[in-house]
Amino acid sequence: MQYMCLIYASESTGPQHGSPEFGPYMQAYQEFTAKAQEAGVLIAGEALQPVVTASTVTTENGKPEIMDGPFAETKEQLGGYYLLECANLDEALKYAAMIPTTRHGRVEVRPIMTFD
Amino acid sequence: MLPPYSLEQAIENIVREEWGRILASIAKTLGDLQLAEDSLQDAVEAALKDWQKNGLPNSPPAWLITTARRKALDRIRRSNRFTRKRTELAYLIALEHRSPDLVDPVSIPDKRLEMIFTCCHPALAEKTRIALTLRTVGGLTTDEIAAAFLDTPTAMAQRLVRAKKKIRLANIPYEIPDKEALPTRLRGVLSVIYLIFNEGYAASSGPSLTRVGLTDEAIRLARIMAHLVPDQTEVQGLLALMLLHDSRRLARVDRAGRMIALEFQDRKRWDKSKITEGISILKSALQQQQVGPYQIQASISALHVEVPDWGDTDWPQIAALYNLLHTIQPSPVVRINQAMAVSYAVSLDAAILMLDEIAAGHDVSSYKAYHVARADMLARMGQIELSKQLLEQAISLCDNATERDFLNAKFLALYP
């Protein structure tokens, strides 16, 4: 079963780019990705550019309406994701807890909907 | 002749007793708690009709489980989940043609432990865990649970439906957690059971006496757990703790429904059989030498109920146990209780000093228990005016009528 791990954190907290903590933080991500890959649970995973780059689209009578910024202005923003193949929620939660951002942010775990 | 005892009542009792075990077994087969529950409910309705006409079957549990499986098969056939449930379907068809009398109820695998772990999963909200455990393992009806929570039956039904949907869609497993996760998850289950107990215990002195059933239900759940995981001493510790607390049920309130402090309770009204059972369970748990918070709290409770008179209480021992509890599970509440014990075991000055330390480390301004303890100690030191002020503060923090009345009575005793 597939689970989406959505990584949320405030962009101003946690290790910042250029700080001494940033290297080990990235290293931790590499180690997690390798671990998930080795265990055969990793399907995909990416980091997102900062929220200043976000554009939000809706359509009104078929016409796109584009807005600058994220879907919702919240303190914690979506910063990346992992898509994992796990036996059950317990396994997915076990891996989610290993994602380095959980130390200063939060990871939302959602099962992927299957159509049959 | 047998006493008048209606068949409906007999059926109700059987269903209540067997509900959890049968439901857990079908849920494991189907991998779908909602479908399992609906099918079992169908079977219960069929039982009411069939048993009234034909009398009780040889083995009611076997009859219920066979019928529930058939009902599940009907439900799957009717629904559009036909293809997705192919494996379950094949299994059910294989079982369908067996006569209920061929199903040996003893051979029905007991999957209640798996189901308890699912219901108490940390991915569910605390209130949901409690409600779901009462519904699935305890066999309480949605209406009964709603009444216990002072919720509407509709809101409670929705909560339960949502929870079962999450269990199915997110694939929360029906499994006993692995060794690594077991201690934490077991603590979660025990905390749910203790919350059920406290819900009933706190209410048993309030206006809503309907909730008294929850203390019995929590004790029943703990008995089931003690049977399923006999090697976990904290389960026995919790069972003992609840029995010992519950032994004082009748003595805790006066005729007018007012709370009576331990000190003034009529000890003759304590339930001797619960005390004896609680202490014997606690003793056998302590022998295993895997001490934990519930066993320590039960030991403290045992020291209170073992003595014939308040004056005989072994305060040094109680203070020492609170100290041990605080090292395992540090919290201001435990410290406050320890200070109360110290006030009797050592001196009032030593106890006040402990309260000062708590106040230095925590914001106690809205901490009711702190003010009550300090007020009690100050009154015993003769500082009535200060004591009165603190009690007033505590009373203003009360949100429970019975407790407020209790503190008001204490207040009047100090300041007639």
Image: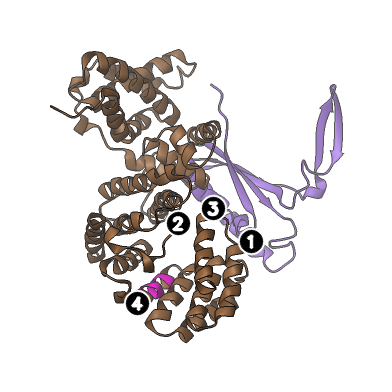
Chain colours: A purple, B brown
Work out whether residue B171 can be spotted: no
Question: Relative to B410, is B41 on the left or the right?
Answer: left
Kindly state the secondary structure of the residue where label 4 is placed.
helix
Q: Residues within 10 Å of mark 2 (few under 14, many from 20)?
A: some
Of pointers 4 and 2, the one earlier in the residue sequence? 2
Residue at position x 59%, y 79% from top?
B385
**Extreme front residue here?**
B416
The label shown at residue A25 is 1
The residue that label 2 is drawn on is: B258
User: Which contiguous range is marked in magenta?
Assistant: B321-326
Disc 2 to disc 1, C-alpha distance: 58 Å
Query: Residue A6 location, x and y as percent?
Result: 63, 45
| Front tag of 2 and 1 | 2
Disc 4 to disc 2, C-alpha distance: 26 Å
B186 is higher (above) or lower (below) than B58: below
Q: Amino acid at mark 3?
A: Ala
Disc 2 to disc 3, C-alpha distance: 48 Å
Q: Amino acid at mark 1?
A: Tyr
The label shown at residue B315 is 4
Disc 4 to disc 3, C-alpha distance: 44 Å
Task: Name the magenta segment's main secondary structure.
Answer: helix
Question: Relative to B102, is A26 on the left or the right?
Answer: right
Query: Residue B369 location, x and y as percent?
Result: 52, 67
The residue that label 3 is drawn on is: A97
Residue at position x 34%, y 79% from top?
B316
